[in-house]
Image (cartoon, rainbow, N blue to C red):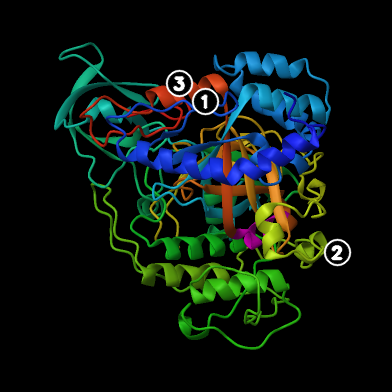
């Protein structure tokens, strides 16, 4: 039966009346199945429109009818044809997706056809955390722009690196439990070899302090004589420089750090040219290891704030986020002030009567670069990681929000009212009941066009110079991101899936819980408002700080307007995963490992040799 808005009223009413009972039964059976996962195969529901329930180590997946997703009937699926087509550029290479993408190409670009297509080809699952909670967190990110130079000169002394020539990747299975191993190096890869094989040699394995990438299960390593060690930490890279191509030089290391964490950015050159950069690789060290969840969330907000053209310079009273400053300043955008106040308190940014922090006036003349330094213990030759504790996070937040901007010769456009402009459209009052049930169909749509990039920038030459030691930045995070140059244009940067990101339709996820390339429906609230934000998204990117199920990072687009919306996005969310029916069936059938296997459950919801390698 067609799952369009033309569905008969009596059928739709019946579906809504039996939905709570159905969901309760499914949830109970799913939990029971997950608790005895090694002994009980997944149960296939009698309703052919429901997929089989299954679980992994990182999430549980409860089948639900598409029509029962809150806000599904209000989504304009016809408008998403181009987004789906972009997604298919990557996914059509997978056997389960190839026929779907071919069928999509033949569809008319209208809502009814897309709605029928989704009903015929996909199962829907509500995502739950391992503790069976349906509520997770939605944050936001954006593509920043910072000033730079093609040469090392004056304040422009911090290099942006490409992939190092001395960094290798090695499969964790190749070295598991090994103290020594014969290995062969080839084009950035270290592979297992036989004793005495041509081009191979025996190495000692010392990966203390390192960890395999959650997505591809590979270590990022270096060869230190006859020993394999984790690749250099951020602190080691800054202290000595590395053997890597330099793509540009920047003056503000904290803006560069913000760009690294968000995975892409544009460099406005002194001569007027522009370079666009996309994520290429990472040094293999996790983002903020051992930091608490609250410290990590606070740090991420400060990192994104620093990425704005006009960074917010906020006083943090007493040097601690445990104190809030009363009073207000009307010059500070109310939404951003709300977030900063939450950051100061170490809590969750929520709408309401929040104390507003005072903003320091932006200096008119050149400011002398003077930064406090956070002392970090040396990570040693083995590349081990020191613990990132709350005191390190506190000092780093102060640096990100208050350190003078080093690129004083760069003049950015005034965009202080971006969030207010974006949300200026009147919003109808919504009650808690309507927000929960999805009955308020009049919620305003967010116009994403104002967050898209533009093309036509002046072409830029190649940077010159090599890796050098730089002054200590005090950044405690050992992770480090390497970039590659891509062409500029109105489309978004290239995400982890390998396709351009779309503002308002692309999301970064943990690929173990949310398969890359999958459509994901989210239900939360619009930034700075109680109005619902219910949208169909695509899981097209990943992030070092995005971990776990029911966890998404909403891509807002390019520039300060998008940046301020990203700052304001920090709220609870529910997520529904849409899987091709053949993928859902195989995921459920193979989601339980053989009896007696360690932990019993699989790591990846949908194992893939490229997008999520199973252990």
Towards the viewer: 243 or 538 = 538
- What is the span of residues highlighted in magenta in the rendered image? 562-570
At x 60%, y 63%, the residue is 306
Residue 255 visible? The answer is yes
Q: Quadrant of the N terminus?
A: top right
Disc 1 secondary structure class: loop
The percent position of residue 498, horizontal first and vertical second, equals 59, 29
| Numbered mark located on residue 112 in the image | none
| Numbered mark located on residue 426 in the image | 2
| Residue that badge 1 annotates | 46
- Residue 187 falls left or right of residue 505: left
- Residue furthest top in the image: 198
| Residue that badge 3 annotates | 586
Marks 3 and 2 sit apart, C-alpha to C-alpha, by 46 Å
Q: Is residue 563 magenta?
A: yes
The percent position of residue 459, horizontal first and vertical second, equals 75, 37
Q: Are marks 2 and 1 in contact (CB under 8 Å)?
A: no
The relative height of residue 18 versus residue 116 in the rendered view (above or below) is below
Q: Nearer the viewer, mark 2 or mark 1?
A: 1
- Residue furthest bottom in the image: 327
Disc 3 secondary structure class: helix
N-term-proximal mark, 2 vs 1 = 1
């Amino acid at each position: 039966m067609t799952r369009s808005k033309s569905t008969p009223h009596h059928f739709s009413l019946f579906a809504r009346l039996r939905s709570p009972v159905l969901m309760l039964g499914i949830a109970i059976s799913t939990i029971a199945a997950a608790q005895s996962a090694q002994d009980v195969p997944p149960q296939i529901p009698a309703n052919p429109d429901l997929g089989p329930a299954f679980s992994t180590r990182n999430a549980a997946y409860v089948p639900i009818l598409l029509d029962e997703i809150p806000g599904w009937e209000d989504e304009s699926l016809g408008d998403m044809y181009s987004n789906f087509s972009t997604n298919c550029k990557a996914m059509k290479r997978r056997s389960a997706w190839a026929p779907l993408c071919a069928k999509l190409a033949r569809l008319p670009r209208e809502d009814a056809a897309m709605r029928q297509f989704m009903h015929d080809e996909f199962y829907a699952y509500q995502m739950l955390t391992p503790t069976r909670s349906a509520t997770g967190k939605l944050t936001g990110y954006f593509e920043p722009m910072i000033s730079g130079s093609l040469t090392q000169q004056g304040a422009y002394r911090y290099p942006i690196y490409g992939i190092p020539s001395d960094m290798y990747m090695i499969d964790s299975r190749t070295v598991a439990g090994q103290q020594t191993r014969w290995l062969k190096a080839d084009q950035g890869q270290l592979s297992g070899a036989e004793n005495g094989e041509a081009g191979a040699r025996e190495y000692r394995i010392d990966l203390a302090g390192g960890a395999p990438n959650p997505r591809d299960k590979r270590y990022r390593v270096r060869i230190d004589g006859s020993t394999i060690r984790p690749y250099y930490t951020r602190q080691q890279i800054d202290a000595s420089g590395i053997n890597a191509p330099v793509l540009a030089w920047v003056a503000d290391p904290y803006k560069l750090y913000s760009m690294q964490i968000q995975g892409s950015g544009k460099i406005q050159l002194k001569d007027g040219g522009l370079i666009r950069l996309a994520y290429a690789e990472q040094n293999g060290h996790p983002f903020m290891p051992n930091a608490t969840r609250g410290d990590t969330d606070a740090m991420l907000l400060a990192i994104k704030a620093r990425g704005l053209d006009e960074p917010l310079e906020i006083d943090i009273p007493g040097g601690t986020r445990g104190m809030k400053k009363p009073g207000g300043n009307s010059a500070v955008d109310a939404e951003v002030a709300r977030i900063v106040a939450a950051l100061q308190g170490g809590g969750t940014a929520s709408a309401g009567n929040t104390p507003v922090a005072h903003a320091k006036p932006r200096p008119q003349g050149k400011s002398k670069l003077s930064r406090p330094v956070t002392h970090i213990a040396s990570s040693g030759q083995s590349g081990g990681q020191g613990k990132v504790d709350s005191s390190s996070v506190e000092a780093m937040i102060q640096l990100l929000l208050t350190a003078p901007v080093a690129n004083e010769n760069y003049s950015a456009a005034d965009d202080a009212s971006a969030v207010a402009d974006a949300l200026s459209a009147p919003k109808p009052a919504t009650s808690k009941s309507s927000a929960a049930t999805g009955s308020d169909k009049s919620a305003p749509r967010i116009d994403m066009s104002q967050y898209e990039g533009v093309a036509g920038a002046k072409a830029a030459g190649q940077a010159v110079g090599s890796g050098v030691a730089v002054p200590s930045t005090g950044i405690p995070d050992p992770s480090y991101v390497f970039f590659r140059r891509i062409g500029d244009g109105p489309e978004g940067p290239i995400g982890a899936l390998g396709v351009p990101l779309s503002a308002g339709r692309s999301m970064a996820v943990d690929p173990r819980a949310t398969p890359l390339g999958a459509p994901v429906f989210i239900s939360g609230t619009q930034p700075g408002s109680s109005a619902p934000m219910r949208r169909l998204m695509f899981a097209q990117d990943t992030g070092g700080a995005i971990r776990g199920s029911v966890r998404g990072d909403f891509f807002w687009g390019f520039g300060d307007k998008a940046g301020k919306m990203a700052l304001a996005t920090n709220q609870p969310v529910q997520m529904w995963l849409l899987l091709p029916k053949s993928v859902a069936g195989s995921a459920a059938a193979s989601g339980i490992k053989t009896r007696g296997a360690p932990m019993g459950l699989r790591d990846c919801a949908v194992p893939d040799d490229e997008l999520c390698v199973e252990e």
